[in-house]
Amino acid sequence: MTNGAPDPGPTLGAVRAAGVALEDAIRLAGQRQDRISADITAARAVLQEAAQAEVGLGTAAPEQLPERAAAAIEKSAAALKASCDLLGVSGLESKAGSLVDEWKECRATIDRCDKILVDLRKTGFGLVTAIVGAAAFVFKDASDFGPKSSLLVMLVLLILTLYLIDLAHQTWLGTAVKRAVVLEAQLNFELTGNIGKDFAAARAVLLGFILYFILLAATSAIFWFSVPAAEVPLSGHHITVYSAFAVGLASMIVGLSVSLNRCKILLALPALVVISIVLGVYYH
């Protein structure tokens, strides 16, 4: 080797390591292929026996029916077991375990939605509370209600947006719970069903509505008390607060009614919205 020439040792080592890895992969793949071939051969034998049992049961005399039926059931069980084993070896999903897998996915979805709802409510309530607190400090000496009304509208929209997102996750959660209950009835599980007996999904949706209603009412009350004391309760500024609260509440009721499939409640909402608009225009 001449001075300054690169050392081929590391490259040769890498090439040898790659070759060894490929040889191991080929050997393992060959073993897997041999196993799959053996399982296919065994499955074909079981299939042939099941077909023979079917033919025998179909042509059996009345006195042979009990014996032939028992043999057919035994061969059917062997065929199902062979199909599960073959699907497992080939890397395909076995339908025999799909109900359990779907139930596990339902439980995982329920857990994710629960965590999202908790995080959404903590973050949303904290954000609205912080904005209201900051507004009360900034506008404590302000006599102009214009900026306050704009901030109130923004907060009502924020509360409404948070509630609709919350309601969407509640709906997805309820769908996952219903599917889990159906699967548990087939699998003889009881976890989701027992939880549903103690606390139904509809009660959880109503609880979410109550929480956001309290947040909306508290926010509107703070801005209502920020109106100058000299104004009457039906002054233009008070009506602005009433209107913002009524629109927010009506929108929440619409979302709740659609979620619970109780759309008859919506018949009373147009009157509430029209009254709020008329009062707002009249007193302004």
Image (cartoon, helix red, strand yellow):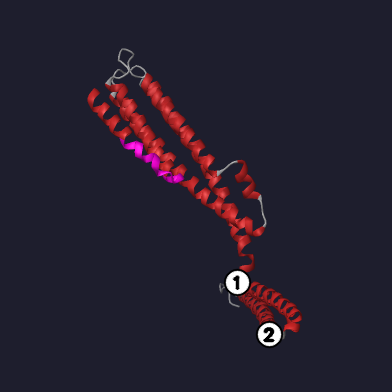
Q: Quarter-wise, where is residue 131 in the image? A: top left
For the residue carrying disc 2, how many other residues have a C-alpha within 10 Å: few (<14), some (14-19), or many (20+)? few
User: Is residue 55 depicted above or below 161 in this figure?
Assistant: below
Mark earlier in primary sequence (2, 1):
2
Q: Which residue is mark 2?
A: 41
Q: Please name the amino acid that badge 1 sits on.
A: Leu
Q: Is residue 161 left or right of residue 14?
A: left
Q: Which residue is mark 1?
A: 92
Residue plotted at (56% across, 72% down): 4
Front residue of 110/184: it is: 184
For label 1, the SS is loop
Mainly helix, strand or loop, the magenta region?
helix
Where residue 283 appears, x then y in whole percent?
Answer: 24, 23
In this rendering, does residue 284 appear at all?
no
For label 2, the SS is helix
Is 265 magenta? The answer is: yes
Where residue 14 appears, x then y in whole percent?
Answer: 61, 73
Is 22 magenta? The answer is: no
Q: What range of the chain is rendered magenta?
A: 258-270
Q: Is residue 34 left or right of residue 276?
A: right
Where residue 47 appears, x then y in whole percent?
Answer: 67, 83
Residue plotted at (58% across, 48% down): 111
Front residue of 104/264: it is: 264
User: Is residue 4 depicted above or below 129 in this figure?
Assistant: below
Q: Please name the amino acid that badge 2 sits on.
A: Thr
Q: CA distance from mark 2 to mark 1?
A: 18 Å
